Amino acid sequence: MPQMTDERVRAGLAREEDLSLLHEVSIKTAGVSHLEMCIQCGTCGGSCPAAQDMDHTPRMLFAMLRAGMRDEVLRSNTPWICVSCYHCVVRCPQEVHIADVMYTLKGMAIKVKLYSDSTAPHFSQTFVDMVESYGRSFELGLASRHYLKHFPLRLPGMMPMGFGMLTKGRMPIAPRKIKNMDQLKKILKRAKQLELTS
Amino acid sequence: MNKYLFYPGCSMESSGRAYRDSIHAITEPLDLHFEEIDDWNCCGATEYLGINLIPAYSLIARNLALATKQMNGTRTVVAPCSACYLNLAKADYYMQERPSLGVKVNEALEAGGLQYKAGTLDVRHLIDILVYDVGLETIRSKVTRPLQGLRVAPYMGCMLPRPDYQHRWSDHEHPTELDDLMRALGAEVIDYPLTTECCGGHMTQIGPETAFELIRRLVADADERGAHLMATVCPMCQMNIDAYQNETNHYFGTNYHMPVLFFTQLMGLAFGKEPDELGIGVELVSSRTALANIGVEVPVIQEPATPRKKEEGLPMPPRLLKRTNGKNGKKSKKEAVR
């Protein structure tokens, strides 16, 4: 885990203008995020089953948010490693919606293309593309597009698994489309013009 | 007959088809009527929420809006997948907690001629219905083939008991609903402290090393505690532990063989249903040896022709082999506890 380089973070200080980032993330998060209430206790990182692979623990990330370190926060792999298991969420004494804040940070990083590894953002985007064209997820299309692009070397090792899924009827070769795709498209088109502002 | 609205979720049509088959098999004996929400769409899983917030919630809310049209006598939506359950419940809850979210989502829904008032529906998971509505007594009374002698690791997974917006579960980290249900079927339930640890979710697709470690912990612990198989309540968990167990073994040089079945498949067996009715045999880590303990023969469903791997690649001292050989090799306790 990298050392925190920013003096302000180490000192736990924040300037008023820095807090704008914290507020921005808080507002863009679904529900009432309670992000401002974080007391830096570290329960989140201690509860996390994937913390060992993260650049920063959630606690550290929230300190960086408070310090206004926009680029560093959005470049951190932490939100992408988060497995959404909600261990931290139920243990957080301040009831911060940690997993939802991670979703918000992912979205913000994608908008400004600030991520160090494109595997996860591309996977999410491919998944969303499938859903936006069929209304349902399409595992075979998703897997083949994703693995060819990001894990071509994993493919040979995965052949038995893919073959097993196909022969056992667990991976249909054609997508299922919902009937009223038109309606879903209209809803999503309108939704994309909207953003949480208050 | 107890009517519920049913949101199957995408996996039911593909990787989780054994779940769908086994649910169909147990609803009739339990007098449950599941009415599928007409033209439901994907809940977005854990992907859409990370891309764009309002579209993600609108996608989820379209299902809720469609469900209200079929309410007629019930306001409960049942989702058998933990991720679908969480997404539907989350949208309903956050639209109330954050009214501005509700307003925006409804603005989007309006473009498709729909609307949803948060709080109208009750979103619940299948096992919640079975344990708390149907009840363990009723379930016990339907058992004709007790699972006596089958040691089950009850695996609840993470997204079901947490964050638990409506306080439905006995505990967030060690809920006992699945344990109780398995005991009602006559199975021997092992202590399984990792019951709500994560299976890795989508990390099998984007960060396999992270996922393999999470899968290893679950499988190793179940194995160490002597489980014959794991019972799961979620198609994502089933997929990860079943389909990626081989790759995980490969990654760590282990040799675990831990079948994972849907809890509904075990219910079906206990109710006397035949394995092929319940989608037993479509799992990639075969449950044949495990189910032999209760005298059930698993049908052969055209095994994939995997070239048989040589037991060892390089000559190794027997002591080392023993340590890396999972179940058959009797690992040292110390290594497995990790």
Image: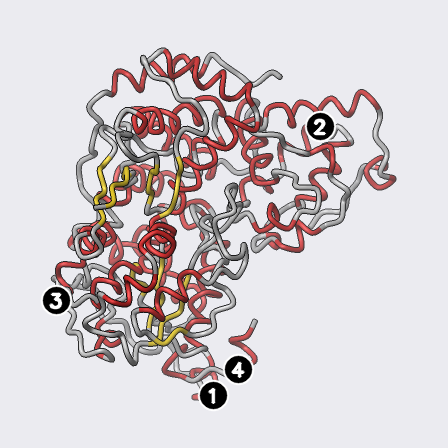
Placement of A116 over or under B52, stated as above or below: below
Distance in Å between CA atoms under marks 4 and 2 = 46 Å
Amino acid type at mark 4: Lys
Distance in Å between CA atoms under marks 2 and 3 = 57 Å
| Relative image position of residue B135 (x, y in whole percent) | 34, 58
Crowding around mark 2 (Cα neighbors within 10 Å: few <14, some 14 to 19, many 20+) is many
Crowding around mark 1 (Cα neighbors within 10 Å: few <14, some 14 to 19, many 20+) is few
| Relative image position of residue B90 (x, y in whole percent) | 48, 35
Comparing B52 with B65, the one in front is B65
From this viewpoint, is residue B175 visible?
Answer: yes
In which chain is the residue bearing label 4?
B
Amino acid type at mark 1: Arg
| Relative image position of residue B112 (x, y in whole percent) | 32, 14
In which chain is the residue bearing label 2?
A
Residue at x 36% of width, y 16% of height: A187
Circle 2 residue: A22
Circle 4 residue: B333
Circle 1 residue: B319
Check contact, mark 4 vs mark 2: CB within 8 A.
Answer: no
Residue at x 66% of width, y 44% of height: A58
